[in-house]
Amino acid sequence: MADVKGGPNPLFLREEELRQAMELLFFAYRDFTGEPDQILADYGFGRAHHRVIYFVGRNPGITVSELLAILRITKQSLSRVLSQLVADGFITQRPGLRDRRQRLLDLTDKGRELENKLTEQQRVRIARAYRSAGAEAVEGFRTVLINIIDAADRGRFDRPELAGRPAAAKTPPTKTAGRR
């Protein structure tokens, strides 16, 4: 439970406000992923496939290790999803330039097409919400989200054009089962 007893208690730190924020995040995530989930189902894919496609698309040439660090899933979980995406022609793997043991990942044309299809409605939804809220609220929302994510991952958003590659390499994967 949040410590709402110590120090000044701004209204937004009351228990009910915190609970409502958690519910809003739940409903926003549910609706944000709803349309992509339907598209993924047509391919026999799940959210794990979407996350892999998204981050490979955002980070062309990403290594398997970097992707594991971002997703925080086991090698076994990633291997299952990645094998299917490679076999179905959505992702290519190539050896690293300096270290041939590395596997560099890229989307194929088919993968880029699916990534665009999956994220189009999400971009529309976010753009609509941003227009409705205004610039100041968008910046506040960004600040809230940055402070919700683990500190180790915050650096990836300092320079969006880098897409977080350096920070991703610093975050070790956990030994949890694959998340969906």
Image (tube, helix red, strand yellow):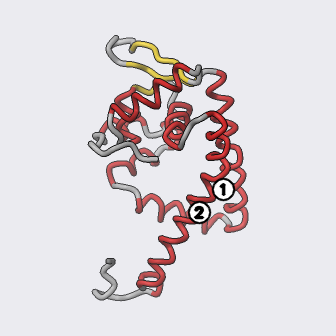
CB under 8 Å between discs 2 and 1: no
**The residue under label 1 is which amino acid type?**
Ile
Judging depth in this view, the residue of 22 and 87 nearest the camera is 87
Callout in the foreground (2, 1): 2
Tell me which numbered mark, 2 or 1, is placed earlier along the sequence: 2
What residue sits right under mark 2 in the picture? 28
- The span from disc 2 to disc 1 (Cα, nearest Å) is 10 Å
Circle 1 sits in a helix, a strand or a loop, which is it?
helix
Circle 2 sits in a helix, a strand or a loop, which is it?
helix
Instruction: Identify the residue at image location x=44%, y=58%.
Output: 146
Instruction: Identify the residue at image location x=42%, y=85%.
Output: 14
Q: Which mark is residue 65?
A: none
Compared to 117, does 134 lie above or below?
A: below
Instruction: State left or right for residue 176 relative to residue 165.
Output: left
Judging depth in this view, the residue of 80 and 131 nearest the camera is 80
Instruction: Identify the residue at image location x=59%, y=35%.
Output: 44
Instruction: State left or right for residue 130 relative to residue 95.
Output: right
How busy is the neighbourhood of tag 1: few (under 14 within 10 Å), some, or many (20 plus)?
few
Which quarter of the rendered picture does the N terminus lie within?
bottom left
Q: Which mark is residue 126?
A: 1
The quarter of the displayed image where residue 32 is located: bottom right
How busy is the neighbourhood of tag 2: few (under 14 within 10 Å), some, or many (20 plus)?
few
**The residue under label 2 is which amino acid type?**
Ala
Residue 26, horizontal then vertical, whole percent = 52, 65
Residue 66, horizontal then vertical, whole percent = 37, 32
Compared to 83, does 23 lie above or below?
A: below
Residue 23, horizontal then vertical, whole percent = 51, 71
Residue 109, horizontal then vertical, whole percent = 66, 22
